[in-house]
Structures are given as structure tokens and as C-alpha cells.
Amino acid sequence: MNKSKLAVGLLVVGSLTVVFGTVLVFVGPIIIDNQIVKNLVIDPKNEMSYTMWKDVPVPFFMTVYFFNVLNPTEVLAGEKPMVEQRGPYVYRKRIQKQNITFHPNHTVSYLEYRSYFFEPSMSVGNESDVVTIPNMLVLGAAVMMENLPFAVRLMISTTFKTFKEGPFLTKSVGKLMWGYDSKLVDFLNKWLPGMLPSTGKFGLFAEFNNSNTGLFTIHTGEDDIRLIHKVDSWNGMTKLTNWKTPQCNMINGTAGQMWPPFMTKESTLPFYSPDACRSLELVYQREGIMEGIPLYRYVAPKTLFANGSDYAPNEGFCPCRQSGLLNVSSCRSNSPVFISHPHFYNADPVLLDYVQGLQPTEDQHGLFIDIHPETGVPLNVSIRLQLNLYMKKVSGITETGKISEVMMPMMWFEENGYIDGEILTTFHTNLVLLPKVMVYMQYCFIVLGLATILGVVLLHYRKKTILNSPPLPIREQRLFPQPRLTNQHTGAPPSPHHSKLSS
């Protein structure tokens, strides 16, 4: 009776174990997804994700390469520019959000400040290294003024000569990056305020250091996780005014640091970039793994900087030149500045014919973002862009000499960051290791339950077989008959006593 009760108990336990494991198969992913949603919502209570969003503690760097002009005199005579890439010059980038304000409609506003610190150990040289690049103040202004009356252009040329501004600059990397004193800049800011983007020293990144990227208002994801990190407004605007079509003026996607979770291979990575003055969108390329963490790699499509002729939706970003160039003059004080991929990667091949010294490759010059698809958190980021100046001869401005019409690369930079150290360990434990353990557990429960049930069934079947089997027949196993001892006189078996007497 006790054995029967034990068998029934084991059968019940085995069945419940199988049911529990089966339920986990369906409920486990839901539990994991709910935990992801709970921990990703932008909320100070979510310590890990909120800290990553607020202060971006992972290493982040900006790597800069200059195109040193080797033949400036020949360029002024109309010859093809010859450039030599100089770099890298690496800066550690610190990002920190301030003025964080949560709103009742599940959005949060903030100002994101960025600052840069030179890293000599990671650089090829020092900020004191000298390079030669086109002078944007002269050659850029010349293109901007080419439609003004000839007398005005002569006056502008005289102004350049007065302040000793030539068509090319030969200055240190530090001054070109963060600014240098210029009497011409002081003059323009005094008499033509608003003409230049900077009111202090003039440098390619002077307005970037110790500044913010504008007032972002994004969704916290508390009401709908599909909206998390998506931009609700920028500087109070829900759309831009720089471009010609409503589609091009849309502020799409996130602020470019995180994306909504549960991404698929059909998902894209839209984000708004204040530096590019527009929304950008990356597309899925392939799967990968980083330190045991699965990822999706997203890259820039060839249509990203295509002109309106090659890709009709980009018509609103024109006036355009060759494909591969984004005209950002509308948000750069009308200066003839264009953005592209480094070395004109993914651009019209004709651009490479105008300049000597460029060698584009995907590995070195393509941009990408590696995303953990379940959370939308970037694991590895490399955004690479090139700054170009459109140059040409402008009559009346003698500083332009006989310069041939050319899209001149000035420098390119890469902003890259990756998760490592304690953050990577915590990320791997919570979002990779624990879900795997849950998956293994659910199948262990199923296997254990089935093994228990099978064991009980086999024991019951064996016992039943033994009880129902007929008794085995008793057979003689003697091969030879045993001789029977008898009394010689009577034929009766001898008695014990007789035997003893006989002996």
C-alpha cells in the first residue's frame, strides 16, 4: 500500500513538473520581456539604465583626421589638390545631461553637455602639430558672395588683404579644432553680426566643446515602451525649418543614444542629429556577437546622402551636388559646407577624381551602430563623417586665384564608444546569462518530470507482469535413477538398526 501511494505521488510530482516546465516555455519569455520593459523605462528608480542614460559612463572618444594640403600654391594655379591624411588626434568625450525635467505626459526634457579632453597616448602626435587646410573664412565667403556686385567683391577682397587672411591656413591642430584669434572674425562680428556661427575664436569645433546640443524632449516609455527615447520635440520644435519638404523637416527617431527594445531585422535606427541638422536612418546589415552578447549591426544605406536625382525623397535637402554629399549650408550660416562619409565612401566616384590622396574603404570609413536587439542599447558605436568645403574661382576676389571648382575635404572625425568593464559584466549577467538560465531550467523541469513519469510507469508495468505470470512447472532434473537399498531376505528396506548390526 505504501509503495502504491509512493508511485502515485511520484506520478503526480512528475506531471506537475512537466506542466510547470511547459508553462515556463510560454510564460518565461513574457517574464523576461516584462523585466526588460520595467528596467528600461527612463526613471531614477531604474538605477543602472537611468545612470547609463544620464551620464553615459562608457568610454566615448572623438578621433580626428586632417587632410593636409601638400600643394596649396599649385591649387591656386588651378591644379588638382593633393592631400595627405594626418592623424589620428584623439579626444575623450564626456557626455552629461543636465536640467532634467519630467513631465506629466510621460516625457522628459534635458540639455546634454559635451566636453572633450585630448588623449596624447592614443594620438599620433600633439595638438601642436601643424597642418595646412583651406581657409573657410576666405574661400567659403568667396562662394557666398559670388552673386554680389563686382564692386562689393573687390571690397571684400581688400578686407581679406587688410587682415592678412589668405586662401589657406597653416596652423596647429589645437587652434584649428578649438579656435584661434582672428581680427577678421572680430571685424565681421562687429559689423555683420550673425554672419558667422561663432562670436568668439574661430575653429572647426569651437562651438562643440563645453556646449549643449539643444533642448531635447523625449518619451520615457512609461506609458508605451515602443516610444521610449523617441524625440517629442527639439528646442520646442516638432519639425525643422531648414529644408524644402515636410518629409525632410521631420524630426524622426531617438536622440541617437538608445532605441526602443525588441528590435527585429526589419527594424531601422532613425535618430535626429543636431550637428547634421536633420534626421538620419540606419538599416540592418548582419548579426554578430560581442563578448557573448548577441547584436544587430546597422549601417548607413547608400541613399543616406544621395542627391535628389538618385533618390527622390532627398530632393528636399537640395540644392544638391553629386550623390554622397549633404548640403548643410542652410544651418551653417549659408557657408558652402557639405557633409559626407570619410574619403567620399559611398559617394559618386567622380568626387575622387577631383582630389589626390583619398582611398575609401568600408572598414575604415563606413559608419555603424551595434545594437542589443532585445533592449535597444548600443554596444559599439562608430559614427564617421567628413567636413568638405566647396571651392571655386570667384572674380573680384583675388584670393581665390584660379582654383578649379572642387569639393575639398578638410577633415573627418569618428565618434565611437563601446560598453566594457563593470557595465558590460552587469549587462551580460542580467540580459544574457539570467535569461539563458531560465531557458535551461524550463527544459530541465520538462525532462525531469518526464523521466519521473516514465520511471513510475516502467516499475508499474514490471510489477504487473510478474504478478500475472503462471507458476513455473516442477521438473525432475535427475539423469540417472538412484539404486534402492532392500533387505536381502525379505526385500524390505533395511532398518537403521539392521544396518548397524550388519556392520
Image (tube, rainbow, N blue to C red):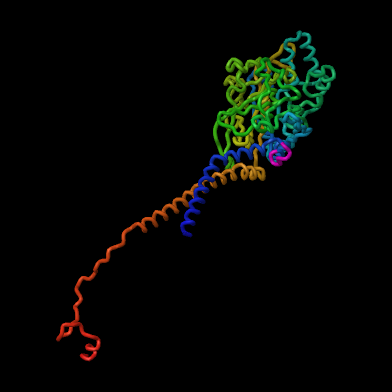
User: Percent position (x, y) of residue 447?
Assistant: 49, 48
* Residue beneath the point at 61% across and 38% down: 33
Q: Is residue 304 magenta?
A: no
Q: How many marks?
A: 0
* Residue beneath the point at 59% across and 22% down: 303
Highlighted range, magenta = 43-49
Q: Is residue 45 magenta?
A: yes
The reply to whether residue 120 is visible in this rendering is: no
The reply to whether residue 21 is visible in this rendering is: yes
Question: Between 368 and 6, which is closer to the camera in this rendering?
Answer: 6
User: Percent position (x, y) of residue 149?
Assistant: 76, 8
Q: Is residue 382 left or right of residue 233?
A: left
Quick check: 477 above or below 203?
Answer: below
Q: Is residue 73 left or right of residue 23?
A: right
Quick check: 342 above or below 481?
Answer: above
Quick check: 407 above or below 119?
Answer: above
* Residue beneath the point at 57% across and 45% down: 438
Give the image quarter of residue 366: top right
Q: Is residue 286 left or right of residue 204?
A: left
